[in-house]
Image: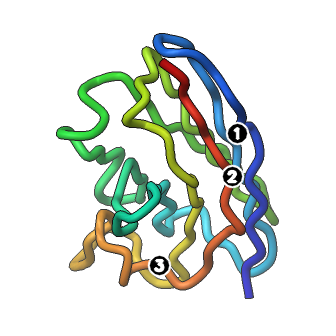
Amino acid sequence: QVQLVESGGGLVQNGDSLRLSCTASGRTGSTYAVGWFRQAPGKDREFVAGNSWAGGDSYNSDTVKGRFSISRHNTENTVTVHLQMNRLEPEDTAVYYCAHSSWCSGYGCDATDQKTYDSWGQGTQVTVSS
């Protein structure tokens, strides 16, 4: 079982930057996929960014537009994932969720698909004012 805790959300202005962090503990794996998703009010949850051993970094190009970057740090017992978000826009307002997969290392699986992930954090709110 994997526990994930996100932090770093908040209220910012249009054009500002924010860095989200997620720490996964428990039965984590250094090669397994980790990802960031978000859900805006009235919309479905969507993929933002992800990382896996075989697939490397992946992004929702339509959403991120080169503004976000994901980074990952593995220790023996934890995985820490950051999402650096620059030039934030009001359309980025959403609850951001961190996710961990217990089986996908990027071979024959899709790190952008929510179904790949079986552990989720509680979410952190990001609000961008205009």
Gap in angstroms between the C-alphas marked 1 and 3: 22 Å
Residue 32: horizontal and vertical position, in percent?
Answer: 50, 69
Residue 82: horizontal and vertical position, in percent?
Answer: 62, 39
Q: Depth check: give the residue in front, 128 or 6.
A: 128
Residue furthest to the top in view is 15
Residue position for label 2: 124
Residue at point 49%, 54% (across, down): 36
Task: Judge the density around disc 2: few (<14), some (14-19), many (≥20) Cα neighbours within 10 Å.
Answer: many
Identify which amino acid the numbered label 3 is placed on: Tyr
Residue at point 51%, 49% (across, down): 94
Secondary element type, mark 2: strand
Determine whether label 1 and label 2 are within 8 Å by CB. Answer: yes
Which corner quadrant holds the N terminus? bottom right
In this rendering, is residue 118 above or below 17?
A: below
| Left or right placement of residue 125 versus residue 89 in this view | right
Residue position for label 3: 117
Task: Judge the density around disc 1: few (<14), some (14-19), many (≥20) Cα neighbours within 10 Å.
Answer: some
Identify which amino acid the numbered label 2 is placed on: Thr
Secondary element type, mark 1: loop
Q: Depth check: give the residue in front, 111 or 43.
A: 43
Determine whether label 2 and label 3 are within 8 Å by CB. Answer: no
Residue at point 41%, 58% (across, down): 53
Gap in angstroms between the C-alphas marked 2 and 3: 18 Å
Residue 7: horizontal and vertical position, in percent?
Answer: 77, 46
Q: Earlier in the sequence, mark 1 or mark 2?
A: 1
Identify which amino acid the numbered label 1 is placed on: Gly
Q: What colour scheme governs how the chains and residues are painted in the rendered image of this protein?
A: rainbow
Residue position for label 1: 9
Residue 47: horizontal and vertical position, in percent?
Answer: 35, 58
Q: Earlier in the sequence, mark 1 or mark 3?
A: 1
In this rendering, is residue 61 above or below 4?
A: above
Examine the image and state in which quarter residue 119 appears. bottom right
